[in-house]
Amino acid sequence: ADVAGCRSEAIRSAEADIVRLSVEIAQRIIHRELSTDPSALESLIRAALEKLASQEVHRVRVHPGQAQLVQACLEESGRAANVEVVSDAALPPGGAIFETARGSLDASLATQLKEIERGLAGQLEAHS
């Protein structure tokens, strides 16, 4: 019984470690992709704009190296006239914070990966 209990605990622990490792690997791959192809951020920006379609976005804070790309995405979506793009050196590449009258949406890559990790961890707990 003790061996069976230890085995189950080891499996649960290994599953959690695999989730963390997978997210960390994904983060490194995506950061590398962003450094070689800045346009990889476009889908992240588009998804955030779709999520905020019914809200008026006043400002987007992004990493300085990605301000032009975000401005181009805003122009393509027809929302550039009302949105100020602010370079924020405190944000890492892939960082994007959308500010609206109701608050802000952190659409940063790191935040989204954390959400994915929490979701996967929640699924593991539910199956335990």
Image (cartoon, rainbow, N blue to C red):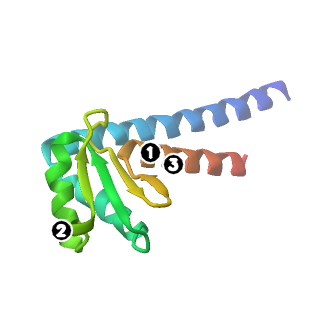
Percent across and percent down for residue 42 are 23, 59
Per the rendering, the mark at residue 75 is 2
Asked if the residues shown at circle 1 and circle 2 are in contact, with their CB atoms under 8 angstroms apart, the answer is no
> Percent position (x, y) of residue 85?
24, 53
Label 1 packing within 10 angstroms: few (<14), some (14-19), many (20+): some
Tell which of 58 and 75 is nearer to you.
58
Residue picked out by circle 3:
115
Helix, strand or loop for disc 3:
helix
Residue type at tag 2: Glu
Q: In which image quadrant can residue 4 be found? A: top right
Measure the C-alpha gap from mark 1 to mark 2. 25 Å
Compared across the picture, whether 120 is left or right of 84 comes to right
Q: CA distance from mark 3 to mark 2?
A: 28 Å
Q: Which residue is mark 1?
A: 111
**Picture residue at 31% right of the left edge, 53% below the top:** 60
* Amino acid identity at mark 1: Thr
Ranked by sequence position, the earlier of labels 3 and 2 is 2
Q: How many marks overall?
A: 3
Tell me whether the residue at label 3 lies in contact with that at label 1, contact meaning CB atoms closer than 8 angstroms.
Answer: yes
| Local SS, label 1 | helix
